Image (tube, rainbow, N blue to C red):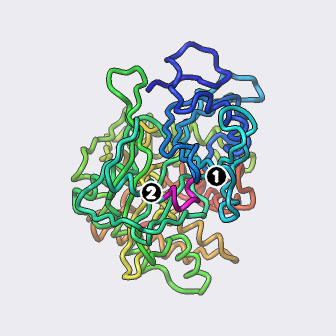
Amino acid sequence: MSEAATHSTATSPGPPPVAEPIPGLLTSLEPLLREWLPRQRWFAGKGRPVTGFSLVAATELLPVGSSKAGLLHLLVRAHQPLVPAQGAAAHPGDCYQLLLGVRATLPPRLAPALIGHVAEGPLTGRTVYEALHDPRLADLLLEALRTKARVGELRCERDMRHDIPEGLVPRMVTSEQSNSSIVYGDTFILKLFRRVVPGVNPDLELPLMLSREGCPRVPAPAAWMVADLDTGAATPHTHALGVLQPYLQGAADGWELALSTLAKGEDFAAEARALGRATAEVHTALTRALPTATVGRPQLELLVDGMAERLEAAAQAVPALRPYAPGLHTAFEALADLTGEGRTWTAQRIHGDLHLGQCLRSPSGEWSLIDFEGEPSKSLAERRMPQPVARDIAGMLRSFDYVAHSHQPPAADWATACRAAYCSGYADVAGTDPRTDPVLLRAYETDKAVYEVLYEARHRPDWLPVPMAAVHRLATDTGTDTP
């Protein structure tokens, strides 16, 4: 199946149009998608108008003319200008996975899932809704995974060591996420990737690798769904669509647990140390499963240049950051100076977006790491690139700082204790304390704080003082916590 601008403002020549399971399908859906898609938490193109859509793939999983509910699986590219204010060239557009239910009328229990009523095209008079809210349609997805179904370009695979029973009751996770999840009977959780790209998704790749290494700190994939799409290349491009993993019933989210512990005035250092050990276990297993690389002068120069460029761009966008920019640059300059002395580092596959919200503690006290996609803003190639483990560690240190500054008054001593305990726990397993390389750790923590400043200024201005407090510290420090 080829990708084409079936219903888009784009006029450039390309592959032939996708064969729609219902002729004119996108004609019916486009007016609804223009309104609904930009409102979704996982839509990446907020702030830019949608100028059109094109189908990447379309599969009718249940006939839409059935007496109850039909189910459409779509991969849709949303076309948007890159910089609307300057009339820049069109962005190629992000591709989104949509699961749409189609009914004649929507029962009251599914009212929150409404996308809209179709006014034109072949679905005229039908009601379209978010299928994941419908238990009948959600159950169909689990059955497809359980039976290793293949429908059109969609292909389900599973690890037969996991028993997937029939009849597990589904419920959609309603908390805000960059993807969508369904819990089945408190036994499994299915994460469906919303923004999809061709290639190997780290959130499937790394947990599979870690399960083969016997690492218990990451839930092992039980089944997964992909699409094999003919994009004109010599071989079809595989797009990862979703992964089914064991559901950690009763597990506490690390962010919420840390917040509640601090609110009660209780110590979190023991938990932070255990989390440091869990992180090191994952990093160690990844070095066994996948190749490592050496970061020498050429690679580090690129790394430092990238950090400096991100700082300059953030300082232009956030005036409050500008007075601190010279001090922050010293963190990157100090790292660059080490390359002149012949220093090298080991790079490996890492989590890529590690913070307390990506960690779960079981009722027995064991920590697990989840969500290995990496930073959504980065390309797939960047997210799969080997990097020093200091990047993950810096992310977690910043997360402790966020918790401390969410408290009034800010609990700086609490954060310091957690940071030290986390590094000590990491050293218990890895054999090396991250704080013994303070220049590298400071550079990564500075880069992370700069990213946070830009994010908060754009999305949550009330939170801007949190990373700005770190900026003030990092602009004057010569290193992070010492052993």
Given the image, on which type of amino acid does mark 1 rest? Arg
Residue for point 42% across, 38% down? 239
Disc sitting over residue 124 in the figure: none
Disc 2 secondary structure class: loop
Instruction: Give the main secondary structure, helix, strand or loop, of the magenta stretch.
Output: helix
Which residue is under mark 1?
41
Is tag 2's residue or tag 1's residue first in the polypeptide sequence? 1
Instruction: Tell me which segment is drawn in magenta.
Output: 131-138
Above-or-below relation of 110 to 56: below
How many numbered markers are drawn? Answer: 2
**Disc nearest the viewer among 2 and 1:** 1
Of residues 132 and 333, the one nearer the viewer is: 132
**Residue 283 located within the stretch drawn in magenta:** no
Query: Can residue 181 be seen by looking at this rendering?
Result: yes
**Residue 132 located within the stretch drawn in magenta:** yes
Disc 1 secondary structure class: loop
Which quadrant of the figure contains the C terminus?
Answer: bottom left
Given the image, on which type of amino acid does mark 2 rest? Asp
Q: Position of residue 458 (x, y in %)?
A: 71, 48
Which quadrant of the figure contains the N terminus?
Answer: top left
Query: Can residue 483 be seen by looking at this rendering?
Result: no
Which residue is under mark 2?
371
Above-or-below relation of 117 to 252: above
Of residues 201 and 111, the one nearer the viewer is: 111
Distance between mark 2 and mark 1 Cα atoms: 17 Å
